[in-house]
Amino acid sequence: MDLQMLTYLFVGGSFALYIGIAIWSRAGSTKEFYVAGGGVHPLANGAATAADWMSAASFISLAGIISFMGSDGTGYLMGWTGGYVLLAMLLAPYLRKFGKFTVPDFVGDRYYSSAARLVAVICVIFISFTYVAGQMRGVGIVFSRFLEVDVNTGVVIGMAVVFFYAVLGGMKGITYTQVAQYCVLIFAFTVPAVFLTYQITGHVLPQTGLGATLDSGQSVLATLDGLVTDLGFKEYTAGNKSTIDMFFITAALMCGTAGLPHVIVRFFTVPKVKDARTSAGWALLFIAILYTAVPAVAAMGRVNLINTVNGADGSGTAYTEMPSWFKNWENSGLIGWNDVNGDGKVQYANGKAFTGNGKPAFDGDKRGPNGERAVTNANTDAKPVAGAPFANEVYVDRDIMVLANPEIANLPNWVIALVAAGGVAAALSTAAGLLLVISTAVSHDLLKKTFAPNISEKQELLAARGAAVVAITIAGLFGIYPPGFVAQVVAFAFGLAAASFFPVILMGIFYKRMNKEGAIAGMSVGLAFTFSYIVYFKFIAPGDNNAAHWILGVSPEGIGTLGMILNFVVSFVVSSMTPPPPEEIQHIVEDIRVPRGAGTAHAH
Amino acid sequence: MSAENAVSSNGGAQTRAQEYWKANIRIILSFMVVWFVVSYGCGILFIDALNQIPFFGFKLGFWFAQQGSIFVFVGLIVAYAIRMNKLDEEFDVHE
């Protein structure tokens, strides 16, 4: 069967599975819609959390980021996993005992304040939309490459599928769909990773393959260090970023992970406090299967790329002899070649092959003298960098590292089709989780708890579904008309979650004396500081965005940590100058610290 | 604060709960120390020193940063869950 048919079969088949699950597990009550009735098995919840958490960014982009950043990319690996330790020990069990539906629920009740609840709702909506915009675009890109439809058509197909199972099934439908999506995405990631590792090192496990010794007698990493330094890059295993910046970025990603509302809310769905702890363990184990394979895919992908492009003697490969994957991805616009020295050979090294932001601007369908795609921004002055034998002639988009692996390694067509289905599963599962958080914040926290407390359960459920429809439409529009700022603001979602939710929840549990005044002051200061720092360096003065201008040398990606520290200090000081919280609140805090009596759950 | 009244009315239960909470905090802190040393310590602060040590084809610091810390994180949560389940039963607050 040809690739096109196989891809339709795999992606179509997985869609049918998700929709079937949605019909089987549709929600009948608000409790089922918001927290799946609270009766999800911890193992299933772990798989659902893993799928919820691993988005198109983890599946498609992470290996590429690590591949090109080397040691500097490790903040993402540790940050996006270490947060689960915080979640399991500091937040999940107590929030499960608290036993409501949403994060603003906890903030509003613990701090006996509608104002605090409203601030929390705004944060939830902002964080979730920032995140979801990227997901919908991811769906569109995967579709356009593998199904050969327009990116916009891809976005609309994705919207229709999410619409079906998120609106119909609510949290209950999403949970079981995500379990299926986890299975699809982990299989789709692992199969090509194992093949790639086996071809290069003879190891089966990517985790051990990264440390393997090659035929040359050198280890993979030592080989890579040598390859990249010869081409004018810094050593792969050495970092460029300052230690303090790495520290702050990792902390912001960790605390942000622990404070992300769509992850927290998953721990409301298990029956007992004990299950919340176990479930966090399952979630991280399922995530670690992918995250510990990523460094291997990243390093070996880079070795493969360099060896394929520069050839055995390191002098470059003639364009006409390039393997088909190179030309396929060039046609998709993710690879570009500019023959700087006019020798007809493709040569890869450090430096910009194209002017401007370094990406090729293709000149329609025009072709150059060797049959390559013509560009309008060729950098004809490109010079060799740091002792490299030639100037760089190639642009390689980071996102191809995972998507192109099966083709680079000459794997059968079904593996390529599987990767397409996996990428779509990763993007859809995260999008659905975020959309649900948005719709819950609107129907539950804004309507039921704040503006229209008298609505019936039936009306609330209707409002939740209506809000989900609106949220999907907006997310789809973000996918079709991607606002330029999306890529700039990914740091926002984590920074804001770290600077707002993490301290307010943590102190709500561990510091009984924390009161309304302290929490509101802390959240406002943390948010305002982080928000303005990122906006200043990303939008107002992007030219100043370098270590010389940063506070303490902390980049906008890591500033959420400083915002979080400010939040802790301000809320502590303010609360000690204002009256303690009322007696019944102190009893709530005492109560959530003891596991017994988390309430009955539905049997599924 | 009416701590004294609370102790006199249901004194036993109150102190039991406080003891449980203190034991809980101790467990959390000891696990957090490991979490911090492995990730921020080995993976960031002392990475250059550890990189001098070869480790199965890796530099040790690089291995901690890219893989080792993640294995430790999984182990930490599992150990924490087991330890807390025991504590819950010791204090008879399990479900």
Image: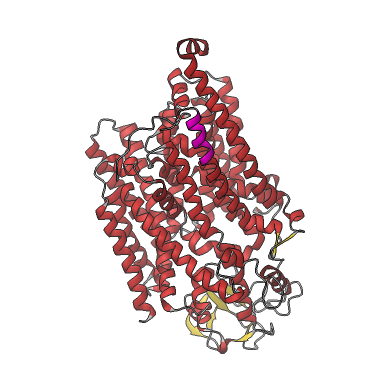
Quadrant where the image shows the N terminus of chain A: bottom left
Write the residue at 66% across / 48% down.
B38
Residue in front for this viewpoint, B75 or A72: B75
Q: How far from the left and from the top, in percent, is residue A535?
A: 56, 48
Q: How far from the left and from the top, in percent, is residue A292?
A: 56, 59
Q: Which residues are magenta?
A: B82-90
Write the residue at 65% across / 66% down.
A211
User: In the image, is A519 to the left or to the right of A114?
Assistant: right
Q: State which quadrant residue A30 falls in.
A: top left
Q: Is residue B89 magenta?
A: yes
Magenta portion: prevailing SS class: helix
Is residue A37 among what the camera can see?
Answer: yes
Q: How is the image coloured?
A: secondary structure
Is residue A481 among what the camera can see?
Answer: no
Q: State which quadrant residue B19 falls in.
A: top right
Q: Is residue A57 above or below residue A317?
A: above
Q: Is residue B11 magenta?
A: no
Q: Is residue B17 above or below residue A394?
A: above
Q: State which quadrant residue B60 falls in.
A: bottom right
Q: Is residue A603 above or below residue A238?
A: above
Q: How far from the left and from the top, in percent, is residue A283?
A: 47, 50
Residue in front for this viewpoint, A39 or A162: A39
Q: Is residue B5 above or below residue A7?
A: above
Residue in front for this viewpoint, A353 or A43: A43
Residue in front for this viewpoint, A597 or A576: A597
Q: How far from the left and from the top, in percent, is residue A117?
A: 42, 33
User: In the image, is B82 to the left or to the right of A446?
Assistant: right
